[in-house]
Amino acid sequence: MDPMRKKDCHDSGESVRVASTFPDEVLERVLALVKSHKDRSSVSLVCKDWYDAERWSRTHVFIGNCYSVSPEIVVRRFPNVRSVTLKGKPRFSDFNLVPPNWGADIRCWLVVFGAKYRCLEELRLKRMTVSDESLEFLALSFPNFKALSLLSCDGFSTDGLAAIASHCKNLTELNIQENDIYDKSGSWLSCFPENFTSLEVLNFAYLHNDVNFEALERLVSRCKSLNVLKVNKNITLEQLQRLLICAPQLAELGTGSFLHELTDRQYSELKRSFNNCNNLNVLSGLSEVAAIYLPALYPACTNLTFLNLSDAALQSEELAKLLVHCPRLQRLWVLDTVEDKGLEAIGSNCPLLEELRVFPSDPFEEGIVHGVTESGFIAVSYGCRRLHYVLYFCRQMTNAAVATIVQNCPDFTHFRLCIMNPCQPDYLSNEPMDEAFCAVVKTCTKLRRLAVSGLLTDLTFEYIGKYAKNLETLSVAFAGSSDWGMQCVLGGCPKLRKLEIRDCPFGNAALLSGFEKYESMRSLWMSDCKVTMNGCRFLAKEMPRLNVEVMKEDGNDDSQADKVYVYRSVAGPRRDAPPFVLTL
């Protein structure tokens, strides 16, 4: 987090003379208009006056790694913060590569915030450990608290949600997304006071148990400013229709299951309710879809800009019929059950599309017959020339196909191609996939995030180092030939901030080639590579401002560094490391 680092403020020069002409009040008003945390960090480096003005006027803090700085340093640096976004575990924890009880507990942050940020209003957490006790502490310690977002967090139950509902009288947002939560019961919704009316965002889509529907219906009816509602799959279509009657003003809707049987009258009422949702621009949910009920959605699709079907196993014909009614779509997430025919429908019906994510319906099924291939991706690229973000899971690809795709869509900023069979070559030529990613990095000059897959040699990484000058995040798995590949990336990508590597032949020479790079990066992750403990110790000795952590699983070779996590920190080694995390 750049503003936490020691500032070399200019003591003389034109910048100081110009800055000093601004009264503090004017400067702070101007800075209030600067929303980007990166821009504000840059502002703080101009001179001492601007540093102080930015310090006092900062109301939101983004911390990309909870161990990069301590809460004590944060509150000392920014005394007037109202909103905090905090990320914890490395991203590979999403793939169960980070052992349980690794850390990233929110408790120590809340204790410090409780003493110094009594006016805290928003807390947004990702991959943090959050206990029920911490949620209760949060609910009782911040009288003006308004917004809680928990994404991919663990450690809490619906008892913690009940504490938030009971005590946060000014709550406007409760966003519970993809968490490992102990769902005890749905009674937590009953804890909102009967006079509570301030809620604007409610998302419990990933909770598993039934909720108290009567309490939910009353809550939705009372909260006239509610514009985001995402319910879990236990909400029936009949119940959904009743909620839509209460909240026709919704801008974002996550439905429950679309499978429950309806009478003709109930279906007509559901369709009429969707027809009254004139403000709807985001639609998700649709788990367990019954195709006969999909037409009920059509009247609400006209203004959709984001359609998330990642929980809906639609077939190609069903998707095609739905997309005809979505002329303004800019973001689309689907499962690979739509197959190439479904992707052709996307190319034909979504000319404004900017983001496409295609997820595997069953990533572990080897003998699967459905799925998407390069032909579907090519069809999308011909019809969706504005595409700049793609996440594409497939089982086969060719170099020529990728070259065609990026030629059609040269403005990619995020290109994440996941060929699910590790080390798979171009299935037509049997050649490595090096030329595919050469085409990506040469053509897409705005590229900021790249995930590579397939059979790749060091040549791919030579291309990345040579051409990907704006790359910030690179994810690599089962790729490369030698240390040279990683050395090319570290030596050639000046804006690289996150490097994630697993199951690659990179060893100590690769790790130690990043001396000049790591302090400007947020983090490096390496697991199941050829790095040794001695290599990690040498890195830690030569770069004392880095935290070099090795996760050692029971029974593994003591000389090998199984999982290595390297990150810069102004707080020094963390104090809560479990026994299996060695801080070097």
Image (cartoon, grey):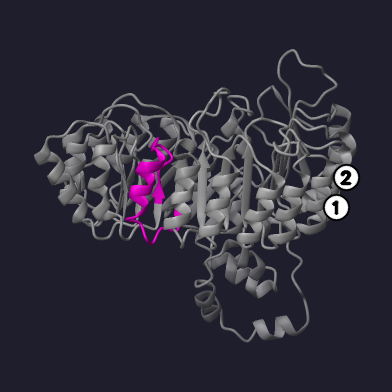
Q: Which of the two residues, 330 or 351, is positioned nearer the viewer here? A: 351
Specify the label residue 491 is tagged with: 1
Task: Specify the segment rendered in magenta.
Answer: 307-331
Q: Amino acid at mark 2?
A: Ser
The span from disc 1 to disc 2 (Cα, nearest Å) is 8 Å
Q: Which residue carries the number 2 mark?
A: 513
Q: Position of residue 219 (x, y in %)?
A: 20, 44
* Callout in the foreground (1, 2): 1
Residue 478 in the image: above or below residue 570: above
Q: Report which quarter residue 27 is drawn in.
A: bottom right
Residue at the farthest front position: 428
Q: Position of residue 382 (x, y in %)?
A: 55, 58
Residue 421 in the image: above or below residue 44: above
Q: Position of residue 301 (x, y in %)?
A: 30, 55
Membership of 99 in magenta stretch = no
Q: Position of residue 372 (x, y in %)?
A: 54, 39
Q: Is residue 463 visible?
A: yes
Label 1–label 2 contact, CB within 8 A: yes
In the drawing, does residue 204 fall left or right of residue 61? Answer: left
Q: Which of the two residues, 510 or 386, is positioned nearer the viewer here? A: 386
Disc 2 secondary structure class: helix
Disc 2 residue crowd, few under 14, some 14–19, many 20+, Cα 10 Å: some
In the drawing, does residue 458 fall left or right of residue 109? Answer: right
Q: Is residue 218 visible?
A: no
